[in-house]
């Protein structure tokens, strides 16, 4: 997870070496991401970055897996999802979007 400081991982579901939650400013220290990394989770927007910046950063670093964007309830979710996916597909990233719990 990137840029979601309040995120927690369900106990017993993941080993500590399988998941991490980092601030966006530390992402560069972790690039390139390991080939075994299957999923990156990030917010639609926050103080440090937005989803488009995340797509570009990950794509430029060679990440070609799934990016799950966590978004607030949106009035027209499909328009936002379509726009993000159009950018993600150009980077070779599969994009999912879920609403905040």
Image (cartoon, rainbow, N blue to C red):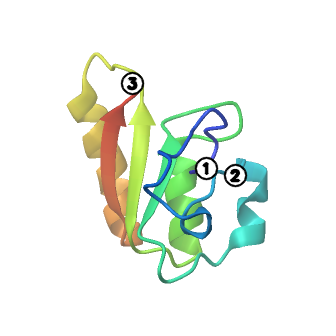
Q: Is residue 38 visible?
A: yes
Quadrant in which the C terminus appears: top left
Q: CA distance from mark 3 to mark 1?
A: 17 Å
Residue at (67, 37) in percent of width and height: 5
Identify the secondary structure beneath mark 1: loop
Residue 89: x and y in percent read: 31, 64
Residue at (47, 54) in percent of width and height: 12
Q: Which residue is mark 2?
A: 22
Q: CA distance from mark 3 to mark 2?
A: 20 Å
Residue 17: x and y in percent read: 61, 69
Residue 63: x and y in percent read: 49, 74
Q: Which residue is mark 1?
A: 2
Is tag 1's residue or tag 2's residue first in the polypeptide sequence?
A: 1
Residue at (64, 51) in percent of width and height: 21
Q: Which residue is mark 3?
A: 101
**Label 3 with label 2: CB-CB less than 8 Å:** no
**Label 1 with label 2: CB-CB less than 8 Å:** yes
Q: Is residue 51 visible?
A: no
Q: CA distance from mark 1 to mark 2?
A: 5 Å
Is tag 3's residue or tag 2's residue first in the polypeptide sequence?
A: 2
Q: Using the image, determine if residue 45 lies above or below residue 42.
A: above
Residue 30: x and y in percent read: 71, 70
Is tag 3's residue or tag 1's residue first in the polypeptide sequence?
A: 1
Identify the secondary structure beneath mark 2: loop
Q: Nearer the viewer, residue 93 or 26?
A: 26
Q: Residues within 10 Å of mark 1 (few under 14, many from 20)?
A: some
Q: Nearer the viewer, mark 3 or mark 1?
A: 3
Query: Hey, which residue is sitting farthest bottom in the picture?
Result: 35
């Amino acid at each position: 997870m990137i840029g979601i400081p309040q995120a927690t991982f369900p106990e017993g579901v993941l080993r500590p070496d399988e998941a991490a939650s980092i601030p966006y400013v530390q992402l560069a220290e972790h690039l390139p991401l390991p080939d075994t990394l299957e999923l990156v989770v990030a917010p639609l927007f926050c103080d440090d970055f937005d989803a488009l910046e995340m797509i570009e950063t990950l794509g430029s670093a060679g990440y070609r897996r799934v990016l799950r964007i966590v978004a607030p309830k949106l009035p027209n979710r499909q328009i936002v999802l379509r726009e993000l996916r159009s950018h993600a597909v150009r980077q070779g990233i599969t994009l999912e979007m879920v609403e905040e719990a």
